[in-house]
Amino acid sequence: MNRERKIQQRADAIVEAVRDGQSMEVALFADYLDKVGDLTSEIEALTPTTTVADMVEAYIKPVTGQRVLSEWARDVAENDQAEIEEDEAERRAA
């Protein structure tokens, strides 16, 4: 399978995992949103029961949030693939 296809499949899997509410991926995306200052941007009012998952779910409802999620997932997938390729190159060199 070529590099681009691997990256796209991984990015799609990450997006789907966030949409499905899988805790690890939701936490990673929430961390990213927090770093860029957008985590609470789609929440009208924080309450004592508002969870990080609630904030992420609200963020990805509009098209702009879906686009950000897709772009972030693509970046993560590209980084993952680069690490895999580096590991393989090191193994071959050893």
Image (spheres, grey):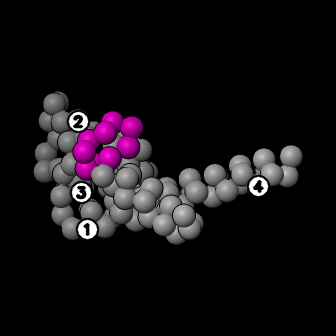
Q: Position of residue 2 (x, y in %)?
A: 56, 67
**Residue 66 as seen in the image, left or right of residue 30:** left
Residue under label 2: 51
**Residue 67 as seen in the image, left or right of residue 77:** left
Mark 2: few, some, or many residues within 10 Å (few <14, many ≥20)? Answer: few
**The magenta stretch spans which residues?**
17-25
The N terminus: image quadrant: bottom right
Q: Earlier in the sequence, mark 1 or mark 4?
A: 1
Residue under label 4: 89
User: Looking at the picture, which amino acid does disc 4 mark?
Assistant: Ala
Residue 64 circle label: 1
Circle 2/circle 1 CB separation < 8 Å:
no
**3D distance between C-alphas at marks 4 and 2:** 41 Å
User: Looking at the picture, which amino acid does disc 1 mark?
Assistant: Thr
**3D distance between C-alphas at marks 2 and 3:** 15 Å
Residue 60 circle label: 3
**3D distance between C-alphas at marks 3 and 1:** 8 Å
The correct choice, above or below, for 7 with respect to 52 in the image is: below
Q: Is-magenta flag for residue 24?
A: yes
Is residue 89 something that shows in the picture?
Answer: yes
Q: Residue at x 52, y 69 (%)?
A: 4
**3D distance between C-alphas at marks 4 and 3:** 37 Å
**3D distance between C-alphas at marks 2 and 1:** 21 Å
Q: Nearer the viewer, mark 1 or mark 4?
A: 4
Q: Earlier in the sequence, mark 4 or mark 2?
A: 2
Q: Residue 59 is drawn in which quadrant?
A: bottom left
